[in-house]
Amino acid sequence: MKIFDFNVHLPQKIAIDVNEVIDDDLNLTGQGLIKGLNLHYDGIKEVSGVNILLFNQKLFYGDSELSLFVKNVKQKFDSFLLTALIDFRDPLVDGYLEETKLHGVSTYMFNSYLQQIEERDFPKILEICKYAEQNKKIICIDGSYGTSKMYTYDNMKLACYVADNITKVPIVIIHSGGYRIMEAMLLAMDKKNVMLDSSFSLNYYLGSSLEQDYTFAYKRLGSQRILFGSDIPYVNFRNAFEQQLDFFNRSKFSLEDIDNIFYKNAQKLVNGDW
């Protein structure tokens, strides 16, 4: 079967302390991305397509190795998306966005925990999302839930705010809202351009009472609105794939549903078919 992994990170550091890995992820240069791609390629070489998350918010400021990295990705995968974490606080962000376009970035991302996004930041983020809509760029909003900051930075409130104002391009909630899967589902039921990415959270909650919620939410929403993601290297790709495939089979999703989730939906995003 064909697979498109919608959530791929390329940090080189592998450590027990996830914060060390995240810090590496946040500082990857073009050369670092090339090394990370080579390091992790054996783990994901069976996939047809990837969405690579670029978390270094300074990456597009004249990095001479970035074009070489993109060339490497093209050589290794049939199709791909590049998702850039956008520093909405940067006074030069307009020029930065233009640079992302030149390097083929298809998706703009916001992460409430990493960027410490508060409600007062929402209007500035919306400005960038409107730019994304005008330029036919996908919007990704991190939907993870946890840590002592789970009440300080409300990513689902941000997702609702953006979805109320952006209707012409897809909005993908990364990690499906985690523990708040039902809230993510309710938002997606209301806003037809909202999709859910299965990375990390689905694997994390397997075996818990939330497994039933994920089954209900994904079935109620429909397979055309779900994207498979692994969150490699935070989650081992093979484990993520096998566990999620088993979940969808066990939950009696059809072969057509599984094909949609693991490949076709993401490929439509690559093709701009929305």
Image (cartoon, grey):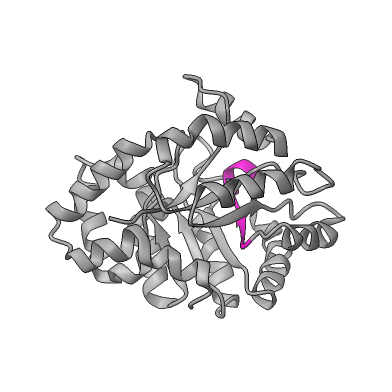
Would residue 267 be counted in the magenta stretch? no
Task: Left or right? Give the position of 213 relative to 237.
Answer: left
Residue 185, located in which quarter of the rendered image? bottom left
Count of numbered marks:
0
Residue 26 drawn above or below residue 134: above
**Residue 57 visible in the shown view:** no
The residue at 24%/55% (across/down) is 213
Residue 205, located in which quarter of the rendered image? top left
Residue 147 drawn above or below residue 101: above
**Residue 266 visible in the shown view:** yes
Would residue 114 be counted in the magenta stretch? yes
Residue 208 drawn above or below residue 251: above
Task: Left or right? Give the position of 250 relative to 171.
Answer: left
The residue lying furthest to the top in this view is 16
Which residue is at the front of the view, 131 or 89?
131
Q: Position of residue 91 (x, y in %)?
A: 86, 55
Which residue is at the front of the view, 183 or 52?
52
Which residue is at the front of the view, 194 or 255?
255
Bounds of the magenta span? 106-116
Q: Position of residue 124 (x, y in %)?
A: 74, 63
Q: Position of residue 132 (x, y in %)?
A: 67, 70
Residue 247 drawn above or below residue 41: below
Q: Position of residue 214 (x, y in %)?
A: 26, 55
Which residue is at the front of the view, 24 or 74?
74
Q: Quadrant of the N terminus?
A: bottom left
The residue at 63%/29% (across/down) is 24
The residue at 24%/66% (across/down) is 257
Task: Left or right? Give the position of 160 relative to 245.
Answer: right
The residue at 42%/53% (across/down) is 48
